[in-house]
Image (cartoon, coloured by chain):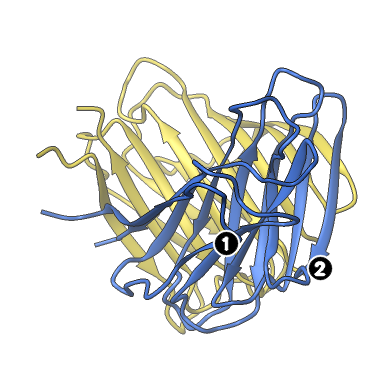
Amino acid sequence: MAITYEPIATQTISGSATSTLTFASIPATFTDLILASSGSNSTLSDIKIRFNADTGSNYSETILLGSGSSAIAARGSNTTGLNHNYTNTSIAAAISHIMNYSNSTTYKSTMTRWNSATSTDPYTAVYVGQWRNTSAITSVTVFVGSGNFVAGSIFTLYGIKAA
Amino acid sequence: MANTYRKIDSATVGSGGVASVTFSSIPQTYTDLLIKGCARSLRASDEDGMGFGINGTGATNWLLLSGNGSAASSGTSSSLGYGAAFIGRIPGATATANTFGNFELYLPNYTSSLAKSYFTDAVTENNSSTAYASLLAAYQSSTSVVSSVILLAGNANLAQYSTFTLYGIKNS
């Protein structure tokens, strides 16, 4: 029986201060990737992702989000990463879909649902993102804009196979 | 062989409807929970709220982004009086016949001793002006593991043929 949805790796933050984690050597045998997380930050901050250690301004996003009082549409061009979540010390859940990651023909697109229902600066949002690079994705780096991940935060990378 | 994405339980509402559906004794052997639902309410209205509770309680607070085809709005609230959080809208009894709303709820790290955060995407569409698409974020401050979940309509019974499936997703 085909294994369609398979865990690739999990990283759980321990007590030491960690602001970056990387899923490296991602096998090219799947069709899509999913990054699922439940975590929090030591301070209110973005949690972002980058591909293949690309720190250049090669990312962009279109955003729809609700703040609890306003519905907001926005975009970011020539950014240095894609948003995965935005939270403080309260637990927040997020999931990023990275489609067709292993091809070497197209730019890479992502769809992210992130959610922070905490009492300070809450949001629920959907982001569509693009990495302007045709290279196959072999690594995913997750990092905070400021502060560190709180112990117990967990990030899992899954592969989805089309055949 | 890994059982990464596996059905834990499912329920289909029978004739006459039911007040709620509960998935209890949830095994603690997965990492995340995923619920897919297709539901309609018996409320004498074109819509009703869909409620979700963990271990018999609603969310500590939640916020919603909703669009109805003519405007988008965002609201926030805390747990509802019937021990559940509002996770989206479903068609009511006066909505277009045979029309059910769909939603997906993702609850990661449900066995942890941390607070719980989950989110839903919910939609209704009935070829009329009253339809909704919504995104919801919810936060439950309880640090208990999730052993049961309840699904219900806000103002009436769930209608016959409403279906709910609980999946476990395992990261190893």
Residue A101 in the figure: left or right of residue A88: left
Question: Label 2 amino acid?
Answer: Thr
- Chain of the residue where label 2 is placed in the rendered structure: A
Can residue A109 be seen by looking at this rendering? yes
Residue A94 in the figure: left or right of residue A145: left
Question: Label 1 amino acid?
Answer: Ser
Question: Element under label 2?
Answer: loop
Residue under the image location 51 percent in, 33 percent down: A110
What crowding class fits label 2: few (fewer than 14 Cα within 10 Å), some (14-19), or many (20 or more)?
few
Residue marked by disc 1: B20
Can residue A146 be seen by looking at this rendering? no
Which quadrant, please, contains the N terminus of chain B? Answer: bottom left
Residue under the image location 42 percent in, 60 percent down: B33
Say if A114 sits above or below A93 in the image. above
Q: Which chain is blue?
A: B
Residue under the image location 64 percent in, 26 percent down: B97
Residue under the image location 60 percent in, 68 percent down: B53
